């Protein structure tokens, strides 16, 4: 069964035990309380999410359509140090929780 605003592939899945919900009443898993990008023409959103199933904290960027279905089937998984570099460059460095 598909849960809106969660994604999984052969190796990784959204960790819904952590983070913010993807909108009212939706599954958790988002690092930030809002999407990084919302496309005005389609309603697609880009979210920074926690990834489940790894020893270290991992993250990925995931596109969803307006109904919460994943738009991509591949993933780009990042660890905490690499995510910090990217978020600082994008002006979101203050939003990331410290590494655990």
Image: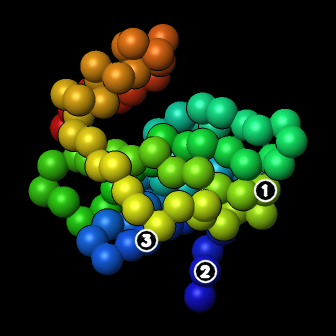
- Residue at the spot x=83%, y=48% of the render? 42
Distance of label 3 from label 1 (alpha carbons) = 18 Å
Which is more toward the observer, 68 or 31?
Answer: 68
Q: Nearer the viewer, mark 2 or mark 1?
A: 1
Where residue 44 sits in the image (x, y, percent)?
A: 73, 48
Q: Secondary structure at mark 1?
A: loop
Q: Secondary structure at mark 3?
A: loop
Distance of label 2 from label 1 (alpha carbons) = 15 Å
Q: Is residue 72 above or below residue 41?
A: below
Which is more toward the observer, 6 or 76?
Answer: 76
Q: Quadrant of the N terminus?
A: bottom right
Query: Which mark, by number, is residue 2?
Result: 2
Q: Is residue 88 left or right of residue 19?
A: left
Where residue 63 sits in the image (x, y, percent)?
A: 58, 51
Q: Is residue 81 above or below residue 94?
A: below
Distance of label 2 from label 3 (alpha carbons) = 10 Å
Query: Which mark, by number, is residue 8?
Result: 3
| Residue 72 visible, this angle | yes
Q: Which residue is mark 1?
A: 66
Query: Which mark, by number, is residue 97?
Result: none
| Residue 25 visible, this angle | no
Q: Is residue 32 above or below residue 77?
A: above
Where residue 37 sits in the image (x, y, percent)?
A: 66, 33
Tag count = 3
Q: Secondary structure at mark 2?
A: loop
């Amino acid at each position: 069964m598909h849960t809106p605003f969660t994604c999984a592939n052969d190796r990784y899945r959204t960790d819904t035990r952590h983070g913010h919900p993807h909108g009212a009443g939706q599954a958790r898993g988002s690092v930030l309380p809002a999407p990084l990008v919302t496309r005005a023409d389609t309603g697609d959103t880009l979210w920074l999410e926690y990834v489940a199933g790894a020893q270290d904290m991992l993250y990925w960027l995931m596109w969803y359509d307006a109904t919460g279905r994943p738009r991509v089937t591949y993933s780009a998984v990042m660890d905490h140090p690499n995510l910090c570099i990217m978020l600082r460059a994008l002006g979101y460095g203050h939003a990331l929780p410290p590494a655990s």
